[in-house]
Amino acid sequence: MSKLEKIDEEPAPTLESLIRRHRALIEELTREGGADPDALKLADQLLRTVTEYARNQAQAAHKKTELEQAERKLKIAEREAAATKAAQAPPAKQMTAEEKMAEYRRIFGMGS
């Protein structure tokens, strides 16, 4: 099994565990004395990338919540608009008995 396959099987690390690993990496790099500035910059960029990813995930979750709320409000507004439209529709005209008979004759082709 390759390293990539092993990585795919493992669950993604949490933000907290990545921060702990970052701190340990920085401590290790500085403990060695004369830490390579390029390695420190790379470690710093790694943490920046991780925190940016976490921020983007939080923003995406917030936007998803906002979208769901907007969809619920839209459904409510559509229902209210339909109810208002139905309430404002003119009432159906009631036909008199004579008008009904005339309509039946017309429909069934029976002359007056």
Image: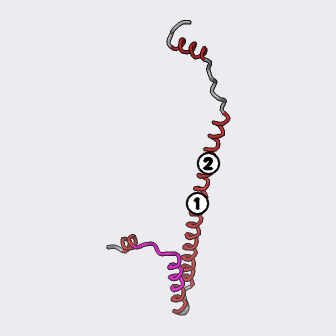
User: Which amino acid is tagged 1?
Assistant: Thr
> Is residue 80 shown above or below 69?
above
> In this view of the protein, which residue sits in the foreground, 39 or 28?
28
Quarter holding residue 34: bottom right
Q: Quadrant of the N terminus?
A: bottom left
Secondary structure at numbered mark 1: helix
- Residue of label 2: 76
Using the image as rendered, state which of residue 97 and residue 58 is in the foreground. 97
Where residue 9 appears, as percent x and y from the top left, is 38, 71
Choose the circle earlier in sequence order: 1 or 2: 1
x and y percentages locating residue 52 in the rendered image? 58, 70
> Marks 1/2: CA distance?
17 Å
Q: What is the total number of numbered labels drawn onto the structure image?
A: 2
Residue at 61% from the left image edge and 53% from the top image edge:
70
Left or right of residue 95, residue 32 in this image: left
Magenta span contains residue 45: no
Work out whether 28 lies above or below 86. Answer: below
Q: Which residue is mark 1?
A: 65
Q: Is residue 6 above or below residue 111?
A: below
Which three-letter amino acid code belongs to the residue tagged 2?
Answer: Ile
At a point 68% along the width and 35% down the height, the residue shown is 88
Q: What residue range appears in magenta?
A: 10-24
